[in-house]
Image (cartoon, grey):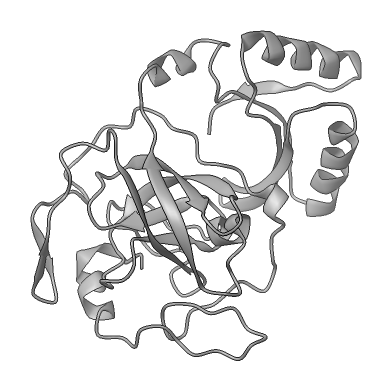
């Protein structure tokens, strides 16, 4: 489970483990936690976009100890692949700091892991339904021997196990090779076209539906904070290559839209 730094992690390990909920409520790992009032559609949840972030000291102390058990951070995320149980966390931790000082947003594709360097990126596959999501690992946990990774609420929605509470998953880290080229090139696999960010979610959803009818790539609405205001961002992507990106940009411009290149 994600924590507000290691101090909060230590405190939370004394909490009750998996909470027994009624059959009509999502199951969560910590007492007092839960899903937000406003649910999110799986199709509106965007993958995290791998980028060559520096590995800083924050969140990467090794070894570290929780409840008398010592854990070590891997020297590299390259080539990591492991199967295990995933759980999820939600409103109780929304807005709190993660182990590296970032702010947890339950609507974003993030995760907590005991040993992967922070930040790192991983593809998580729900082995029961083959659904996948790419997450940014930015916190430590889960500190339950039977769990491998804790996912954000949005990630659990995308993978289809919010109501169940846990899922058998495969976690595979993504290579950073070539990611530097994405910053200054139109040839990267993780490029997006942004159509706008709106205060009114209905406006964003209407634009998404209109554009989705004319293109073959995903069109998503995702929450984003701009100047302290929560907006709904409309984006296309990721695109396959530079040729597809240019084609889509030209198509949208010919229909009166003004798309801009973005990297999350």
Asked if residue 203 is positioned above or below residue 252 in the image, the reply reads below
Counting labels gives 0
Residue 62 x/y as whole percent: 10, 52
Residue 79 x/y as whole percent: 29, 34
- Judged left or right of residue 103, residue 13 is left
Quarter holding residue 31: bottom left
The residue sitting at 46% across, 62% down in the picture is 168
Residue 35 x/y as whole percent: 59, 73
Asked if residue 190 is positioned above or below residue 41 in the image, the reply reads above
Quarter holding residue 250: top right
Q: Quadrant of the N terminus?
A: bottom left
The residue sitting at 42% across, 77% down in the picture is 29
Residue 56 x/y as whole percent: 20, 39
Q: Relative to the observer, which residue lies in front, 242 or 57? A: 242
Asked if residue 137 is positioned above or below residue 31 in the image, the reply reads above
Q: Relative to the observer, which residue lies in front, 148 or 193? A: 148
The residue sitting at 55% across, 25% down in the picture is 190
Quarter holding residue 241: top right
- Judged left or right of residue 55, residue 229 is right
Asked if residue 121 is positioned above or below residue 165 in the image, the reply reads above
- Judged left or right of residue 106, residue 242 is right
Q: Relative to the observer, which residue lies in front, 210 or 231? A: 210
């Amino acid at each position: 489970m994600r924590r507000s730094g290691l101090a909060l992690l230590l405190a939370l390990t004394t909490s009750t483990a998996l909470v027994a909920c009624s059959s009509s409520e999502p199951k969560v790992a910590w007492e007092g936690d839960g899903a937000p009032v406003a649910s999110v559609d799986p199709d509106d949840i965007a993958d995290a976009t791998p980028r060559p972030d520096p590995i800083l000291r924050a969140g990467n102390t090794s070894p570290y100890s929780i409840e008398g058990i010592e854990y070590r951070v891997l020297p590299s995320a390259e080539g990591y692949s492991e199967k295990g149980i995933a759980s999820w966390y939600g409103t109780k931790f929304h807005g709190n700091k993660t182990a590296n000082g970032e702010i947890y947003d339950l609507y974003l594709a993030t995760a907590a892991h005991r040993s992967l360097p922070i930040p790192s990126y991983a593809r998580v596959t729900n082995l029961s339904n083959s659904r996948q999501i790419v997450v940014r690992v930015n916190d430590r946990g889960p500190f339950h021997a039977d769990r491998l990774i804790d996912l954000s609420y949005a990630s659990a929605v995308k993978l289809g196990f919010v109501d169940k509470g846990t899922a058998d998953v495969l976690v595979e880290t993504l290579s950073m090779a070539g990611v530097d080229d994405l910053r200054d090139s139109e040839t990267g696999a993780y490029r997006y076209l942004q159509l706008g960010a709106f205060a009114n979610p209905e406006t964003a959803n209407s634009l998404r539906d209109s554009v989705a009818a004319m293109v073959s790539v995903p069109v998503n609405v995702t929450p984003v904070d701009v100047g302290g205001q929560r907006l709904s961002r409309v984006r296309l992507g990721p695109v396959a290559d530079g040729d597809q990106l240019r084609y889509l940009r030209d198509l949208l411009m010919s229909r009166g839209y003004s798309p801009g290149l973005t990297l999350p």
